[in-house]
Amino acid sequence: MAKINGSYEAMYILDPNLSEEATAALVEKFTGLVENSGTITEVDQWGKRRLAYPINDLNEGYYVLMTFTAAAALPAELDRVFRITDGVMRSMIISKDQ
């Protein structure tokens, strides 16, 4: 039986050189995308943190952790949007359901 709704976590790292307004706009964009098709449990903005290894010659990134519940198709769409959005350095979406 196919699952209708699942629980997910999305972690993404934004370019630290973005302005505060641009960073807030990107977080709002991703939050709005999830809210259109699912329910957000929490958006935890960790802020600028040192990266484990340099990405695009940058040693810092702006970390955001988003927990949400949505249909199975939403994580694929969210991942696609992460990949085509300028300013997103890395992203990962995991299913919390076993």
Image: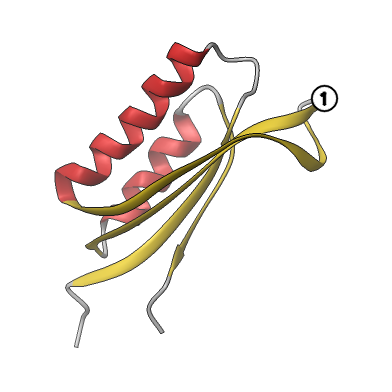
Is 11 situated left or right of 57 in this image? left
Q: Residue at x 57, y 15 (%)?
A: 18
Q: Residue at x 46, y 30 (%)?
A: 84
Quadrant the N terminus occupies: bottom left
Q: Residue at x 35, y 52 (%)?
A: 42
Q: Which residue position holds label 1?
A: 57
Task: Please tell me whether residue 81 is drawn above or below residue 68 in the rendered image.
Answer: above
Task: Please tell me whether residue 6 is drawn above or below residue 1 in the rendered image.
Answer: above
Who is closer to the viewer here, 33 or 2?
A: 33
Q: Residue at x 40, y 31 (%)?
A: 27
Find numbered disc 1 in the image and state the secondary structure of the residue it sits on. loop
- In this figure, which colouring scheme has been used for the structure? secondary structure
**Is the residue marked by circle 1 packed among few (<14), some (14-19), or many (20+) residues within 10 Å?**
few
When asked about the image quadrant of residue 19, the answer is top right
When asked about the image quadrant of residue 35, the answer is top left
Is 54 situated left or right of 26 in this image? right
Who is closer to the viewer here, 84 or 87?
A: 87
Q: Residue 3 location in percent, x, y?
A: 22, 78
Task: Please tell me whether residue 94 is drawn above or below residue 45 in the rendered image.
Answer: below
Is 6 situated left or right of 37 in this image? right
